[in-house]
Amino acid sequence: MNILITGSNGQLGNEVRVLSALHPKHQYFFTDVVETAGVVVLDITDRSAVSAFVESHCIDLIVNCAAYTNVDKAEEDEATANKINAEALSVLGGQGVRVIHVSTDYVFSGDEHVPCRESDAVAPRTVYGASKLRGEKLLLATCPEAVILRTAWLYSSFGNNFVKTMIRLGREKESLGVVFDQIGTPTYAADLAEAIFTIIESPVWKSGVYHFTNEGVCSWYDFTLAIHELAGITECHVRPILSEEYQYKTPRPHYSVLDKSKFKKTFGVDIPHWMDGLRRCMVLLKG
Ligand SMILES: NC(=O)c1ccc[n+]([C@@H]2O[C@H](COP(=O)([O-])OP(=O)(O)OC[C@H]3O[C@@H](n4cnc5c(N)ncnc54)[C@H](OP(=O)(O)O)[C@@H]3O)[C@@H](O)[C@H]2O)c1
């Protein structure tokens, strides 16, 4: 297959690039809104540019790793968040090829007490979450064969993320307050990339919405303790604090655990625990 990857400079896009080396039977076209080594420019909001690219490279499948991911900035710039996270999905979905797209736990309210299933009611509380939900709907309307993977708490050795921030703060500060009343599942973007290749290599195409994170649950506080332990940071005292003490600009879900049963059953795979993913990521960060 000729596979177009969008948002290739991001956390997930980079992990897909790394993993593509293990799947050499396909031809890959790595793109992003900014040109970098091995990545050509393609703005997913530019309908004519996307159509021209898909046609001239005989694309069979689009893997959309591009997104507007700054949750706080989205509150102030709703138009751009909608353009990239929502309207662009009708551009990608309208190309007449299959699409694998990534969405978010933020489509849910975050008030749940049990892991969310794909069929559960959605109720985004943020501009980011609402824009991602609109994107899901526009994609399914324009490309009924699409696969949508909802994920959460993504980190990687590429890009900026919570893991890197906690390592930096742990080395700079003697004491650090981290919230313990938000529960979710840290997800190593390399494992999400693996899930994308599981879908690509599946003998039968199985469209639909799926939840995918690593296994297990924790709070941001527990996650930070694990990060510091693996990074060998011993001088920083990590304190559990409540969300209300942290002064978030944008509301954060209190409970955003995703039920992954459908993905595991459909594709017949096990998913690594979040500690296992974190260990593998830390090896790369230390190296
Ligand atoms: N990060 C998380 O914790 C998290 C949680 C749940 C779901 N997700 C979802 O997971 C997916 C991957 O997230 P990620 O963390 O890998 O994102 P990321 O690191 O922010 O990467 C997104 C990439 O898309 C690029 N991009 C932005 N606008 C574009 C456009 N118009 N055309 C082409 N490329 C564009 C970005 O470029 P610039 O940086 O230059 O804008 C960036 O390189 C996204 O769909 C996100 O919504 C993420």
Image (spheres, rainbow, N blue to C red):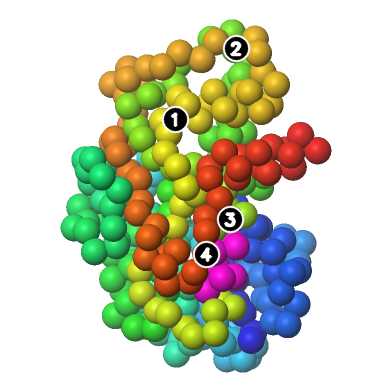
Reading the chain from its start, which is encountered first: label 2 or label 1? 1
Between disc 1 and disc 4, whose residue precedes? 1
- Of marks 1 and 3, which one's residue comes earlier in the chain? 3
Residue topped by disc 1: 220
Q: Where residue 59 sits in the image (x, y, percent)? A: 59, 86
Callouts 2 and 3 close, C-beta under 8 Å: no
Mark pair 4, 3: CA separation = 12 Å
Label 3 Cα crowd, 10 Å radius (few <14 / some 14-19 / many 20+) = many
**Cα distance between the residues tagged 1 and 4:** 27 Å
Labels 4 and 2 touching (C-beta < 8 A): no
Amino acid at the residue labelled 2: Cys
**Left or right: residue 135 compared with residue 68:** left
Q: Is mark 3 on a helix, strand or loop?
A: helix
Decide which of 145, 232 is in the foreground and name it: 232
Q: In this view, does 207 lie above or below 84?
A: below
Residue beneath disc 3: 191
Mark 4, secondary structure of its residue? loop
Q: Which residue corresponds to mark 4?
A: 269
Q: What stretch is highlighted in magenta?
A: 193-199
